[in-house]
Image: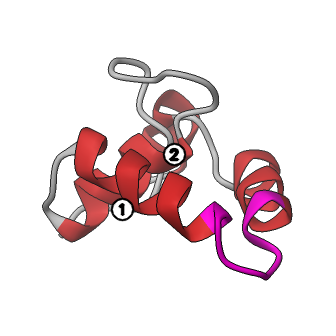
Amino acid sequence: MSALARPREGRVLGGVCAALARRFGTSATTMRVIFVVSCLLPGPQFLLYLVLWIVLPDEEKASAAW
């Protein structure tokens, strides 16, 4: 498993789904579908996405910190 950081390539909006897909070893498309389907359920999914977008570092910043 790799560090949780938003990649520069493969991003659609903020790179959160791409980062989670890379972390858990699945495709970004699968993670995006899971996110969209989860938005149909009640809960704070959209707010969680925004928080992760703010909190997760870019890939360059994360690699510079290591």
Residue toward you, 26 or 43: 43
User: Residue 3 bears which disc, if any?
Assistant: 1
Residue corresponding to mark 2:
62
The residue that appears at 50% across and 21% down in the rendered structure is: 12
Q: Position of residue 9 (x, y in %)?
A: 35, 18
- Residue density around tag 2, few if under 14, some if 14–19, many if 20 or more, within 10 Å: some
The secondary structure that dominates the magenta segment is: loop
Q: Is 30 situated above or below 38?
A: above
Going from the N terminus, do you reach mark 2 or mark 1 first?
1
Snapshot colouring: secondary structure
Q: Are the two marked residues, 2 and 1, in contact with CB atoms closer than 8 angstroms? A: yes
Q: Is 26 situated above or below 19?
A: below
Would residue 36 be found to the left or right of residue 1 on screen? right
Residue sticking out furthest to the front? 40
- Of badges 2 and 1, the one in the foreground is 1
- Residue density around tag 1, few if under 14, some if 14–19, many if 20 or more, within 10 Å: few
Would residue 9 be found to the left or right of residue 57 on screen? left
Q: Quadrant of residue 14?
A: top right
Q: Is 23 situated above or below 19?
A: below
Residue toward you, 16 or 40: 40
The residue that appears at 49% across and 29% down in the rendered structure is: 60
Label 2 vs label 1: CA separation?
8 Å
Q: Which residues are magenta?
A: 39-46
Q: Position of residue 53 (x, y in %)?
A: 72, 46
Residue type pointed to by label 2: Ala
Task: Pick the quarter of the image with the N terminus.
Answer: bottom left
Per the image, label 2 sits on a secondary structure element best described as: helix
Q: Quadrant of residue 38?
A: bottom right
Residue type pointed to by label 1: Ala
Per the image, label 1 sits on a secondary structure element best described as: loop
Q: Is 27 situated above or below 25?
A: above
